[in-house]
């Protein structure tokens, strides 16, 4: 794992180690950074936003690496994951910085020294962050980024310097610049705090130093991030902003648009409000702005292209929630991961809050955490409905339980549903009138007793427990294992049904997916003919890669 001065290749293992350390470090510093956030206007959760952004990038790179991707594909996934997972103003800026670094590492030429590559990567990240902000303000994370990159560039010219030395210098310069931010912004000086986004960036650079050296950085003389925060400062300002003249809403959306449409979009949004950030590339952009006219901000996006994943936050509600005013959590909600539009509709009709998922787009910890915290309930049951998403949901639940702002106010139970049909079965017996413990017990027992299977198509040659398969073969899945290999969809589907019904059953649930072409209906007819005493229900799930999902209860 030792990096050499002239290797010209930043190893993927080093990148993975960095993202793990950075995610853990931000998780630990999240509450401290959130508490620092009195400026810029109320992103309100800078530490949480930066943590969720890096967490999304980490989940994205881990997913493709587990699928066998090489370094450059993994780095592209890392940058895109950060962009898609970015939360808040600070998260959007951070996503642009991470994307710039990933692109520079991928573009490294043979023979380039790692120290020069990484110093240039930090320089490009700083340039990208300034370019992303409509009106850059010094004394923020931009200033900290510039100090770090300047220190890195100044050192990298020495042929004996390694990448680890570059990050040690950059991290030290970031900590020193962070300590000076109150001298640059009066609002920070008045509050007795350093800049929140700058503190988050410093944590990330410290993580990079640790990843390359194994050492924990030595803090500067003054304990950064431990300044007293006078509560009267925020309490005395009008609800809805941390500045009396700030806009009332934060608007964020992803935008599919050509690069030529961006100048007009930036000009329009800049005239509507402040804290404008537009980042991205290759036709996909992340837009963030604070405005009073939400409709105009979204219309500007429609004129430029296709906005989606629109999020609007009313700062008055955000501030009130932070101070516990008027937003007591109440009731019970189900948060369910859905692998297709039809499944999402089924879960929503049953009262669940849906998180999109499925193969290739499984939800991040941050997405599930956001669903839990935003649903407003005091009791939340999470149905991950996918074996690979169970641990993600459990981590999200643990984060809620460990959050001082939510401790004692929210109870979270994750039912380890391994399949979409298990989630449907659990939701069918959900009864809000029962006690939380009894409801979770009934839902868990029902999901556990739902024997589940699926039909899919082999994408490559492999050896399964049912024997070898070739691309295009039809595979029957039972409880997560490939139990049937064949050439005909109907034969494999009925083979799976026969095995599931061998142990008896009263209800068969069939969920048709993309490419099913009547498979679910034909399977239902087979059950009616062979097992007339068994009830059958058929749903249009719309899930990809699986023409049929099925369960027997």
Image (cartoon, rainbow, N blue to C red):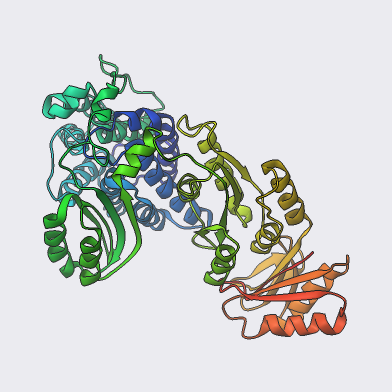
Q: Is residue 77 above or below residue 510?
A: above
Residue 74 in view in this figure:
yes
State the image coordinates of residue 375 (x, y, percent, origin top left): 49, 49
Q: Is residue 225 left or right of residue 403?
A: left
Residue 3 in view in this figure:
no
- The image quarter containing residue 342 is bottom right
State the image coordinates of residue 449 (x, y, percent, origin top left): 79, 57
Q: Residue furthest top?
A: 221
Rendered residue at 88%/76% (across/down): 533
Rendered residue at 32%/50% (across/down): 313
Q: Nearer the viewer, residue 454 or 212?
A: 454
State the image coordinates of residue 541 (x, y, percent, origin top left): 59, 72
Q: Is residue 311 left or right of residue 499?
A: left
Q: Is residue 260 left or right of residue 551?
A: left
Q: Nearer the viewer, residue 239 or 12?
A: 239
State the image coordinates of residue 466 (x, y, percent, origin top left): 77, 68
Rendered residue at 47%/44% (across/down): 373
Q: Which part of the image, by quadrant, shows the C terminus? A: bottom right
Q: Nearer the viewer, residue 464 or 317?
A: 317
Q: Is residue 358 above or below residue 35?
A: below
Q: Which part of the image, by quadrant, shows the N terminus? A: top left
């Amino acid at each position: 794992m030792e990096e050499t001065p002239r290797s010209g290749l930043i190893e993927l293992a080093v990148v993975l180690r960095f993202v793990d350390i950075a995610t853990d470090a931000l998780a630990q510093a999240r509450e401290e950074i959130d508490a620092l956030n009195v400026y810029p206007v109320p992103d309100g959760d800078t530490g949480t936003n930066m943590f969720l952004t890096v967490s999304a990038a980490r989940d994205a790179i881990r997913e493709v690496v587990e699928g066998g991707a090489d370094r450059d594909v993994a780095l592209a996934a890392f940058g895109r994951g950060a962009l898609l997972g970015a939360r808040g103003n600070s998260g959007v800026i951070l996503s642009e910085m991470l994307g710039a670094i990933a692109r520079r590492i991928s573009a490294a030429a043979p023979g380039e020294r790692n120290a020069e590559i990484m110093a240039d990567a930090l320089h490009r990240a700083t340039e990208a962050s300034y370019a992303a902000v409509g009106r850059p303000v010094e004394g923020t994370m931009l200033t900290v980024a510039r100090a770090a990159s300047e220190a890195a560039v100044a050192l990298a010219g020495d042929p004996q310097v390694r990448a680890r030395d570059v990050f040690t210098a950059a991290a030290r310069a970031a900590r020193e610049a962070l300590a000076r931010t109150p001298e640059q912004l009066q609002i920070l000086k008045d509050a007795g705090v350093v800049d929140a986004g700058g503190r988050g960036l410093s944590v990330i650079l410290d993580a990079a130093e640790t990843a390359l050296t194994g050492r924990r950085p030595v803090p500067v003389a003054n304990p950064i991030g431990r300044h007293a925060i006078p509560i009267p400062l925020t309490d005395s300002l009008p609800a809805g902003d941390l500045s009396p003249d700030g806009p009332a809403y934060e608007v964020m959306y992803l935008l599919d648009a050509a690069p030529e449409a961006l100048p007009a979009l930036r000009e329009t949004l800049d005239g509507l409000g402040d804290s404008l950030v537009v980042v991205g590339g290759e036709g996909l952009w992340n837009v963030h702005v604070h405005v009073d006219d939400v409709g105009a901000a979204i219309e500007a996006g429609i004129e430029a292209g296709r906005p989606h994943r629109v999020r609007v936050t009313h700062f008055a509600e955000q501030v009130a929630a932070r101070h516990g005013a008027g937003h007591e959590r109440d009731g019970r909600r189900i948060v369910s991961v859905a692998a297709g539009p039809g499944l999402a509709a089924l879960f929503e009709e049953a009262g669940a809050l849906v998180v999109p998922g499925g193969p290739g787009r499984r939800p991040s910890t941050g997405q599930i955490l956001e669903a839990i915290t935003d649903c407003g309930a005091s009791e939340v049951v999470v149905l991950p409905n996918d074996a690979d998403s169970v641990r993600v949901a459990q981590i999200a639940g643990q984060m809620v339980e460990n959050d001082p702002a939510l401790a004692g106010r929210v109870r979270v139970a994750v039912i380890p549903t391994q399949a979409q049909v298990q989630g449907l079965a659990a939701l069918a017996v959900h009864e809000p009138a029962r006690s939380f413990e009894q409801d979770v017990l009934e839902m868990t027992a029902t999901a556990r007793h739902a024997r589940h299977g699926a039909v899919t198509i082999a994408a490559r040659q492999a050896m399964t427990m049912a024997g070898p398969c070739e691309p295009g073969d039809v595979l029957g899945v039972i409880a997560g294992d490939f139990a049937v290999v064949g050439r005909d969809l109907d034969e494999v589907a009925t083979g799976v049904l026969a095995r599931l019904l061998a142990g008896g059953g009263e209800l068969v649930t069939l969920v048709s997916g993309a490419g099913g072409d009547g498979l679910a209906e034909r399977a239902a007819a087979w059950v009616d003919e062979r097992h007339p005493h068994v009830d059958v229900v058929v749903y249009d799930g719309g899930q990809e890669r699986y023409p049929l999902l099925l369960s027997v209860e």
